Image (cartoon, rainbow, N blue to C red):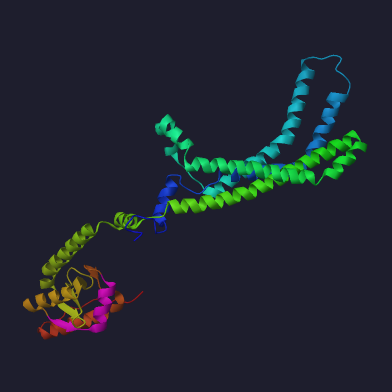
Amino acid sequence: MAEQYGEKVHEATDHRLREARKEGQVPKSSDLSSAMVLVIATGLLLFAGDSGIQTLAPYLYEQLGGEAWVATNSDQVLNHWVRMVWIVLWVTVPVSLVLAVCSIASQVSQTGLLFLPQKLTPDWGRVNPIAGFGKLFSMQSAARVGFGLFKIVLVIVVAGSALWGQYEEFLEMIGWTVPEIAVYTVQTVLWTCFKVAVALLILALADYGFQFWKTHQDLRMTEQEVREELKHMIGDPQIIRRRRQVQQQMARSRITNNVPHADAIITNPTELAIAIKYDPTKMPAPIVVAKGAGTMAQRIRRLALEHHIPIVERKELAQALYRDVDINQEVPVDQYNAVAEVLRYVYQLQGKTLPKMPQRKAG
C-alpha cells in the first residue's frame, strides 16, 4: 500500500549515496566544528596557558612598569616593534595552528574530502526575495530557531551551575590580594568556558547524529526510484533483450559458417557440442571453430549430420573444451593429446591418414 502512494520504503542504494555525495548532500553539523575548536582552545588555555603567560609577563612588566623611554630613534622603535611581533607570534602561532588543524580535521571527519566546483557557480535562486521570505516561516527555520534557543538555555544553565559552585570562594575573595583575585578569576572563567564548551560539544554530537539520520531518511527511495535506478545502471530490459537476440543471431551465423568446415564434433552427448578443425599447414594446433549448449548444440549436431562430419562422444573432453576454450582459440596443452586421439579416430573412420602433429608439453 505504501508503494502505491510513492512512499520511501527502501534504503538508499550505494549509487544514490555516491550521487548525493557529489552534490554535497552529506550528513554534517555546523556546530560540531565550532564546539571542537572551542573545547580545544579553552583546554589549551587551561593546561598550557602558563607558558604563554610566562613569556608575555616579563615583556608587559617591562613596558608598563619599567623605565620610561628618555630618548628614541628609528633603530630603537624598529627593535621594539620586532621584539613585540616576535613575542606575540611565539605565543599565538602554535595555538592558531593547532586550532586550524583541529577545525579542518573536524570538517573532514564529518564529510570526508569533498571537491564541489559546482558550488562556486552563482545560484540566483538563492537571492529570490519571495523564496527567502518563505523560508523564514518554514519548519526547518523554526527548528533552527528552537535549537538556537535551546543552546542559549544550555549555556546559561551550565555556566550558572559552574559559577554557583564557587560562591563560597567568591565570599572569601575579600581578604585576598589583587594577584590572587586575578589568578582565581581567570581560572574560574576558563573552567566555566571549558564546561560550556564540553556541553556544546555533546549537543553538537547529538545534532550530527540527527543530521546523519535525517540525511539517510531524505535519501530513502520509492519503489519506482529503485526500478529507475536499476534500469539506468543495468540498462533498459528491451535493449538488453535486443542485444541478446543479436548475440544469438551472430552465434547461429558463426555456427552455420564454421561447422561445415570442421573436422570433428565432440559432444557430451546431447547437452554440449564443440566443433574442432585442424590444418597442419596453417595451424600449430587444433582450434575450436564453434561451440554451443542446448539448442545451439543441437544445431551443431544437425549441421554436422548434413555435411557428414563425424560426431564423437567424449563427455569430459567436451566439458573441458566448452568451459576453457573460446571460439577460434587453440586447444590448451592439457587437452591436446585427447583432441589428437579424437582426430586420429575420425581420420581412421574416413580412411585417411592423420598428418603428423607436433608434440606439445605442458609448461
Q: Which residue is rendered at x = 80% and y = 41% of the image?
A: 187
Answer whether residue 318 is magenta in the image.
yes
Tell whether 321 sits left or right of 302: right
Magenta part of the chain: 310-325
* Quadrant containing the N terminus in the rendered view: bottom left
* Quadrant containing the C terminus in the rendered view: bottom left
Report if residue 101 is visible in the image: no
Tell whether 352 sits left or right of 46: left
Answer whether residue 334 is magenta in the image.
no
Residue 177: image x %, image y %? 91, 35
Report if residue 173 is visible in the image: yes
Residue 224: image x %, image y %? 31, 56
The residue positioned farthest toward the left in the image shown: 306
Tell whether 199 sits left or right of 247: right
Splitting the image into 4 quarters, where does residue 253 fall?
Answer: bottom left
Q: Which residue is rendered at x = 50% and y = 49% of the image?
A: 27
Count of numbered badges drawn on the protein: 0
Q: Which residue is rendered at x = 53% and y = 47% of the image?
A: 28
- Choose between 23 and 314: the one closer to the eye: 23
Q: Which residue is rendered at x = 80% and y = 36% of the image?
A: 53
Residue 230: image x %, image y %? 32, 58
